[in-house]
Amino acid sequence: MPLFDQPDSLEPAYRDAYTQWRAGETPSSTGHLLRTIDPEISRGINAYVGQSNPLIRSQAKKLALQAVRTYDPGKGAKLGTHVVNQLQGLKRINRRQIDILRVPERVGLEKQRAKLAEQELVDELGREPSLTELADHTGLSMKRLKYLRKFNLPTAEGTFSDMGNESLEFAPRVQSAASDDPWLDLVYGDLDPVGQKIMEWTLGLNGEPIRSNYDIAEKLGLSPGAISQRKAKIQAMLNEGIGSRSLF
């Protein structure tokens, strides 16, 4: 008994591969079928995307296989036409791929901008700037700078575009102390830039890593003893609040 009733519109070039696949959907028959209809897959990519890449071609093969599963030779449509029509879904997939790629490019551009500004301030001040000083120098908000410090997705220099979103849900985060204590924010705001850096590196605030007294002293151009003295003064200020953290 024939696999499908005649008359049918299945093209002769695809008949053997389609018949074998319908008789048993195995990795071998599926691979043979996809290779056979590859010209239609390429035609769909050119029509709906314009330029292929490994991700697009992979998605195109999945859509093509879905199209073959819904194909009915007895309804008058050519298999090639049916496959190409179903590949319209590539337009949505391509838009999503472009959007995902643009996000880290924007972030990478701003990270590079902040890094250069930070180095300028280091050269000018002779020490690393506080987040407040960096925000004033770059024009970026403190909230944005905190976000940039937490975003560690690698990006290639020279490939950035001016697009993106400040509230990216997939941005990776580093483990650090969050400023969930209002008193902590008040004390931080009352300190000079050096004191702010000491707080950032001691408590891991604003996306900064926690550093030892020795490292802090080296970066700020002070002695470890001076750092300990400043910490003691900051701790006294923190102790005036309820539930505030300890620097030691």
Image (tube, grey):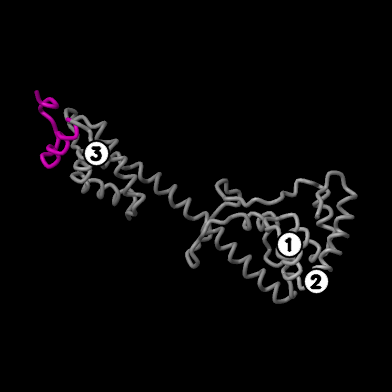
The answer to whether the residue labelled 3 contacts the one labelled 1, judged by CB atoms less than 8 Å apart, is no
Residue drawn at point x = 62 percent, y = 70 percent: 116
Mark 3 element type: helix
Residue 17 lies in magenta, yes or no? yes
Spatial CA span between label 3 and label 1: 57 Å
- When the figure is inspected, residue 33 is found, relative to residue 128, above or below; the finding is above
* The magenta segment: 1-23
Residue receiving disc 3? 27
Residue receiving disc 2? 223
Residue lying farthest to the top in this orientation: 1
The x, y position of residue 195, in whole percent, is 81, 63
Instruction: Tell me if mark 3 has few (under 14), some (14-19) or many (20+) residues whose alpha carbon lies within 10 angstroms of its own.
Output: few
In the rendered view, does 103 fall on the left or right side of 16?
Answer: right
Spatial CA span between label 2 and label 3: 68 Å
Between 80 and 229, the one nearer to me in the picture: 229
Mark 1 element type: loop
Residue receiving disc 1? 212
Task: Identify the image quadrant of residue 4.
Answer: top left
